[in-house]
Image (cartoon, coloured by chain):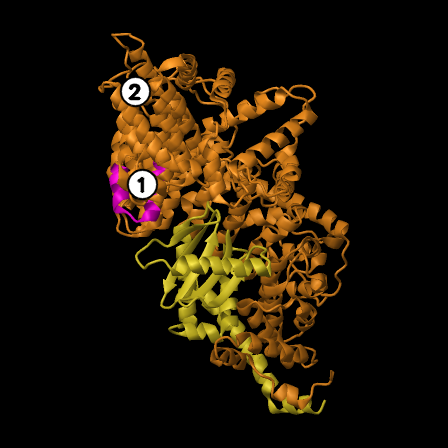
Chain colours: A yellow, B orange
Amino acid sequence: MIHFVLLISRQGKVRLTKWYSPYTQKERTKVIRELSGMILTRGPKLCNFVEWRGYKVVYKRYASLYFCMCIDQDDNELEVLEIIHHFVEILDRYFGSVCELDLIFNFHKAYYILDEILIAGELQESSKKTVARLVAAQDSLVEAAKEEASSISNIIAQATK
Amino acid sequence: MAVVPSLMDSLFQRSIDDVIKGLRLCPPGTESIFISKSLDEIRREIKSTDPQTKATALHKLTYLHSLHSAEMSWAAFHSVELSSSAAHSYKRVAFLSASLSFNPSTTQVILLLTHQLRKDLSSANPHDVSLALSTLSAICNPDLARDLTPDVFALLASGKPFVRKKAIAAVLRVFEQYPDAVRVCFKRVVENLESDDMGILSAVVGLFCELTEKEPRSYLPLAPEFYKILVDCRNNWVLIKVIKIFAKLAPLEPRLGKRVVEPICDHMARTGAKSLAFECVRMIVTSLSEYDSAVKLAVAKLREFLLEDDPNLKYLGLQGLTIVSKTNMWAVLENKELVVKALSDVDVNIKVEALRLVMCMVSEDNVMEISRILISQALKSDPEFCNEILGHVLLTCSRNFYEVVFDFDWYVSFLGEMARIPHCRKGNEIENQLVDIGMRVKDARVQLVHIARELVIDPALLGNSFIHGVLGAAAWVSGEYIELSRNPFEIMEALLQPRTSLLTPSVRAVYIQSAFKVLTFCLSLYLKLNNGNGNVVVASSSMHRFTKESFVNLMNLVETNLGPLAGSNEVEVQERASNVLGLIKLIKLIVFGSEGDNVKGEVEASEMVKLIFDAFSEDLGPVSVNAQERVPIPDGLVLKENLGDLDDICGGDTEFSLPSSFSIVKLQKMDAAGTSDCTSKEESETLTESTSLLAEHRKRHGLYYLSSENAGTVSNDYPPAIDPKDKDADEAEDLARLTEESLVIKKKPNQARIRPVVVKLDDGEGFNVSAKKREVEGGDLISGAVQEVLLGNEATATSSSSRKRESSKKSRERNKQQHGHGKERKSQSTGKDKEHDGQGQREKPKRKSRQRGDGGALPAQSS
């Protein structure tokens, strides 16, 4: 199972973290620090797996972001590489040529997409089309709600409550 | 705090974008100030009743929490509150914050979420449902699991595939937290194995993959279903998971292995996906290692991996080989060149894997060749990897009392070679092994002495502090086995050369003690010569004539070099130097003492020297680590822990730390002396005795006196601290006693194999298996429930008929259980009534009411 997902920038800034196992806040910071140190210093031609504390961490670098996933000893690393790629492709399709800035300002959308792909640390949807469709449907719901909320009548109603 | 939202608050609330931009723009170092300011704002805003304001505040807080570690547990209640909002967007924000910040065991308001989750799980809006499911899987705890099991159960047969898939994935968490849920939900989960939708299938298979990790035996009855998927399915994700499941099941049931080996080899050969191929390979070499043909195919695949340029594949190939090496060594040997090539790869991980593999390959025949390859590799590598190699080599060769080493002459010179490698930091281990071999392997001693000589003679090595330990061992060897040396004078000169002042005091002390032994040896030879034996048995290959003149030169050399050391500040050095000097004085009596009435003194002296020499010529064997414990404590003696009493005597500033880098034997000698002291006295006397001894010792050595001239004047006419006559004899006796108790290995190379008489060592070889005991308890409970479910309804041969029977039984069971649960959820009585749900097929109605099983509206029995 996947224990956590980290997105770290080249400078070591954290862009997204999702934890599928219980980790306290202190542990989380420690983990992030350790892994950043290990992964960011690795050269480009090296293999994408590192051993860490008895687990394996699979990482892949896309532009300036490192996508890291921590898995058990038994898991298939190549499969996880595929999952990472799957995630990136979906992000790309959703944002249209995604870049780090997109993820910075739309971190919640990244979370929602991740929630469609991985649940409880396991892959749940391997079809990009389905995920795209789902997320789009959710977005349209949100949009509809927003429009309603920002209609003038509503604002007036709020202000005069 | 105003409860009514002011216009200011809602209109001018800073949005999430503002916060993000603000953080990025603020000068470095002031982020924490900015964050705490934002947190204050959020605290105010979040109390608002306006959902928009609240949502934005919560959203910002979630951001700060997940990416900047802000503390957010105080806002838990607000998450719950917001989640009850009807608008999907707010709900989304609330649930996101909940899943990111709630801790299932500590967040107290988590139970308040139950009701909301329940509502959402049965909501009409599938997105709400999926949101609830995601959240549930993130924060499930036993209470939530117990309460929401029925809802999840209903969703397992939902009409929408993506909802069902999510439900299946979420139900794993529910099972973990509340194993009884298995009884309710399992059948439905199993039904989904027949589904056509890939999403659902992969979710189910993923679920079983996780479950079989913990307790595979319970899922054996499902093997036929898995087999069908293995053979029919074309989706790689699913196949990988199914193969993993079989990897766990096959060892339990040999017939299963026989059936699956064909399809798996098939997949492995045909697939283009490396991940699938690797999974097949891994499965074959772990669980199907008896099927030679399959293993051969797998190894061929691994070879392909190793030949690729992609470092990932190379790494995985090596890992695969490591797994194979446990059962089929030939596979590794076949690919030897590739493994060795990988040793010089760019990537550290690959190198280390290759190194480990090479170590597996080591056997008696090839140890020399492999060592040669490895050393040449080590010389080319960076210090880190170089030491890694050395460490592994030392470990492997010394394993099990040098099991793999046949030619000790070669191994000893190899140790010397390793010590000289520039980056070597394994001096400790090498030192230990040199001494160990000296003690255990009699026939290697000649070569050992030779190597030791080379090490002590070389003045350049004295400057390298990493190698001092090894030099200490070399000096010890030279001294101990001096009779095997070719040129004792040379050794003496080497031991006393001026550059030895660069050594650490503990090592220097060893040098001096070895000089002592050499001196004694030469003296005894001299005495033998002098006592008129024309044909003297001079120990092997000493070529020098021991004329009186050469001997006098030797003594002068010793005196000149050690004289100043008798005034050294270091205790060990000073003491031993003084010993030697004292001996020289006595010797002078013998050598020059043919004048007059010192004949008596001369005779005594020569007897004494003989005794010393005899003491030194006792063969020292290895002492078991447990030997000390075997010394019986005599009655009436109470040994206190850690010399605590000494603190009182010495006022707490003494440090009696014996030089730890020195050989074990010396330590034992001291211990033997210590115990023999104690045993001969009563307890109270022991203390006073040692106190007075200590006081004397301190007086003599001036340990705590700053004036060095005092020490200088004192030492000149200072008798040796240890009376060589008595103590050595005692020590020798004690040692002999102790070594008898332990067992000695003598190895004769070029002859028959060892008769391993193994010394029982302490088991320092605890294997640190970092076993993740993930809810072993829960695992047992789950498997218990699963077994009940699966085996309780005896499945017949054909799955379909069993399914039908199962479904009828299931619905009856369900009835009972629903009554048993007794949770009246009349809340969603918005009349969407169900039809049959029967065999878990696609449902037309979007929702099922939970009263389905009630009141006798049973699903249509298709019998």
Q: Which residue is mark 2?
A: B484
In the rendered image, residue B374 lying in the magenta stretch gets the answer: yes
Q: Nearer the viewer, residue B648 or B832?
A: B648
Residue B250 can be seen, yes or no:
no
Q: Residues within 10 Å of mark 2 (few under 14, many from 20)?
A: many
Magenta segment range? B373-395
Q: Residue at x 25, y 37 (%)?
A: B373
| In the rendered image, the vertical position of residue A16 relative to residue B241, given as above or below | below
Dot 1 and dot 2 within a common chain: yes
Q: Residue at x 33, y 14 (%)?
A: B527
| In the rendered image, the vertical position of residue A29 relative to residue B654, given as above or below | below
Which label lies toward us, 1 or 2? 1
Question: Residue B771, located in which quarter of the rendered image?
Answer: top right
Q: Position of residue B765 (x, y in %)?
A: 49, 32
Amino acid at pointer 1: Arg
| In the rendered image, the vertical position of residue B492 relative to residue A13, given as above or below | above
Q: Which residue is mark 1?
A: B499
Chain on which label 1 sits: B
Q: Residues within 10 Å of mark 1 (few under 14, many from 20)?
A: some
Q: Position of residue A134 (x, y in %)?
A: 50, 68
The C terminus of chain B lies in which quarter of the figure? top right
Q: Nearer the viewer, residue B33 or B306?
A: B33
Amino acid at pointer 2: Leu
Q: Position of residue B512 (x, y in %)?
A: 39, 31
Question: Residue B105, located in which quarter of the rendered image?
Answer: bottom right
